[in-house]
Image (cartoon, grey):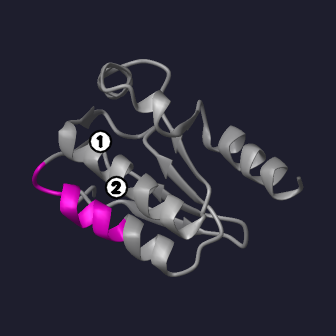
Amino acid sequence: MDLGVARVEITETCGTLMFPAEVDLSNGDMILGQALRLLDSGTPALILDLTGCAFCDSNGLNVITRSQMRASELGVPMWVVLPPRGLVRRVSDVAGLQRRVAIAPDVATARDALTSAAHR
């Protein structure tokens, strides 16, 4: 059951926050808190996975933007995984998200990018 909370997966190389099906005023602050706690816990990289998210309003964009700001402060690389089509992708494109954060089509691509960056 999706209670509007993001699921978290932690590995040695990164933390992945999988957004719920909907992100809006009712759960945006809670998800932001999850992302910030993950960053502040010392994760070496962060992936925000929106592939399972069907609806995302400005609260979801706020989570992404503020997470990126905190990740930058900490020197932690961050990638956002967006579905190739649909409402979430359209909202992200209209907001110009791709100009502010690294976007990947899937989690595997984001993890590969993080691994490649770590070996430079």
Left or right: 10 in relation to 114: left
Q: Which residue is mark 1?
A: 61
Q: Name the spot of residue 44 as percent of width and height, x first.
A: 65, 69
In the displayed orientation, state which residue is furthest to the left.
26
Q: What label does residue 74 carry, if any? A: none
Q: Quadrant of residue 6?
A: bottom left
Picture residue at 89% right of the left edge, 56% below the top:
119
Picture residue at 46% right of the left edge, 58% below the top:
17
Q: Which residue is mark 2?
A: 66
Among the two numbered marks 2 and 1 on one chain, the one whose residue lies closer to the N terminus: 1
Picture residue at 70% right of the left edge, 38% below the top:
109
Residue 110 versus residue 92 in the image, above or below:
below
Dot 2 lies on which element?
A: helix
Check if mark 2's residue and mark 1's residue have beta carbons within 8 Å.
Answer: no
Instruction: Name the magenta segment's main secondary structure.
Output: helix
Q: Amino acid at mark 1?
A: Leu
Viewer-nearest residue: 76 or 48: 76
Picture residue at 47% right of the left edge, 72% below the top:
38
Left or right: 11 in relation to 47: right
In the displayed orientation, state which residue is furthest to the front.
73
Q: Name the spot of residue 105 as percent of width and height, x first.
A: 59, 30
* Magenta stretch bounds: 25-34
Q: Name the spot of residue 21 as percent of width and height, x first.
A: 30, 43
Residue 93 versus residue 77 in the image, above or below:
above
Dot 1 lies on which element?
A: helix
Q: Name the spot of residue 111 as percent of width and height, x first.
A: 71, 49
Rounded to the nearest angstrom, the CA distance separating label 2 from label 1 is: 8 Å
Location of the N terminus by quadrant is: bottom left
Residue 32 part of the magenta-drawn span: yes
Viewer-nearest residue: 40 or 47: 40
In the displayed orientation, state which residue is furthest to the bottom.
41
Q: Amino acid at mark 2?
A: Arg
